[in-house]
Image (cartoon, rainbow, N blue to C red):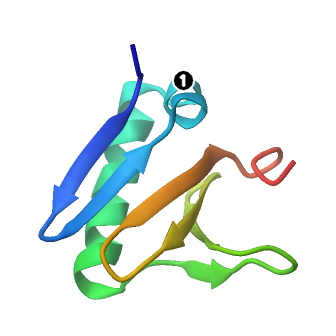
Amino acid sequence: MRNDIVADEGDLVHDFGDAAASKASGEIRERVIDKLKRYAGSGAGDVKALVGQPGERLRIGDYRIVFIETADAISVRALGHRSDVYE
């Protein structure tokens, strides 16, 4: 059984893998989904390109989402506290 969280925003799908979903509490998951929907819809958010690896990061308070965006989807690679999400 997968422990994914998926939120749709038009043609974009945000897919949280098992590792990311297991680290996030319900409240954080909701904040993450809200911020991803906002980013997917308008491009708004604290997003920066990663250095030395593909993808971008979205800042949500003390948490970071590492994701790869394609023309039709946003795929979340990591979700965690800022102190250990990049490890």
Q: Is residue 3 above or below residue 62?
A: above
Q: Is residue 18 left or right of residue 44?
A: right
Q: Is residue 24 left or right of residue 74?
A: right
Give the x, y percent position of residue 4: 38, 32
Q: Is residue 31 left or right of residue 9?
A: right
Residue plotted at (41% across, 21% down): 2
| Quadrant housing residue 6 | top left
Q: Nearer the viewer, residue 55 or 48?
A: 55
Residue plotted at (35% across, 75% down): 39
Amino acid at pointer 1: Ser
Identify the residue under disc 1. Answer: 22
Give the x, y percent position of residue 31: 36, 48
Q: Is residue 2 above or below residue 24?
A: above
Give the x, y percent position of residue 74: 41, 66
Give the x, y percent position of residue 42: 26, 86
Q: Nearer the viewer, residue 51 or 1?
A: 1
Residue plotted at (27% across, 59% down): 13
Q: Nearer the viewer, residue 81 or 20?
A: 20
Q: In which quadrant is the N terminus drawn?
A: top left
